[in-house]
Image (spheres, helix red, strand yellow):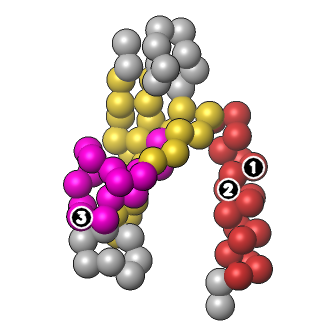
Amino acid sequence: MKKTIPITTIPLANTKEGIISITHIEEPYGEGSKPVVSIGISLDGEENKPDWKAHIPYENVDDVIAALKEAKEKFFK
């Protein structure tokens, strides 16, 4: 059974109420499916109703973090 465990929320830069929510989800796609970390973006601060979300398998987390760091180093001034 799908189970969600909130990890943290982060204020979304350049918005008045927006947040980034990070959540652990067990069995996100049905019984026996592997857990994922969910990254949700909510422009109005509704943690449980994100406007966008991405589910990232834990096996891919390190590569995603490395790509985000690379993007920040190259493009964030």
Q: Which residue is at a point 39% across and 57% down the rendered structure image?
A: 41
CB under 8 Å between discs 3 and 1: no
Which residues make up the magenta segment? 38-52
**Secondary structure of the residue carrying numbered label 2:** helix
Type of the residue with mark 1: Asp
- The residue carrying pointer 2 sits among few (fewer than 14), some (14 to 19) or many (20 or more) residues within 10 Å by Cα, namely few
Q: Which residue is mark 2?
A: 65
| Magenta stretch, overall SS | loop
Q: Which mark is residue 63?
A: 1
Residue 57 appears at what percent x and percent y? 62, 34
Q: Is residue 17 magenta?
A: no
- The residue carrying pointer 3 sits among few (fewer than 14), some (14 to 19) or many (20 or more) residues within 10 Å by Cα, namely some
Q: Earlier in the sequence, mark 3 or mark 1?
A: 3
- The residue carrying pointer 1 sits among few (fewer than 14), some (14 to 19) or many (20 or more) residues within 10 Å by Cα, namely few
Q: Which residue is at a point 76% across and 69% down the rendered structure image?
A: 70
Q: Is residue 30 visible?
A: yes
Q: Which mark is residue 44?
A: 3
Q: Which residue is at a point 53% across and 9% down the rendered structure image?
A: 32
CB under 8 Å between discs 1 and 2: yes
Q: Kindly indicate the quadrant of the structure image that contains residue 58.
A: top right
Quadrant holding the C terminus: bottom right
Residue 43 appears at what percent x and percent y? 31, 65
**Secondary structure of the residue carrying numbered label 3:** loop
Type of the residue with mark 2: Ile
Residue 20 appears at what percent x and percent y? 39, 59
20 in relation to 63, above or below: below
28 in relation to 59, above or below: above
Extreme front residue here? 51
Cα separation, mark 3 vs mark 1, equals 29 Å
Quadrant holding the N terminus: top left
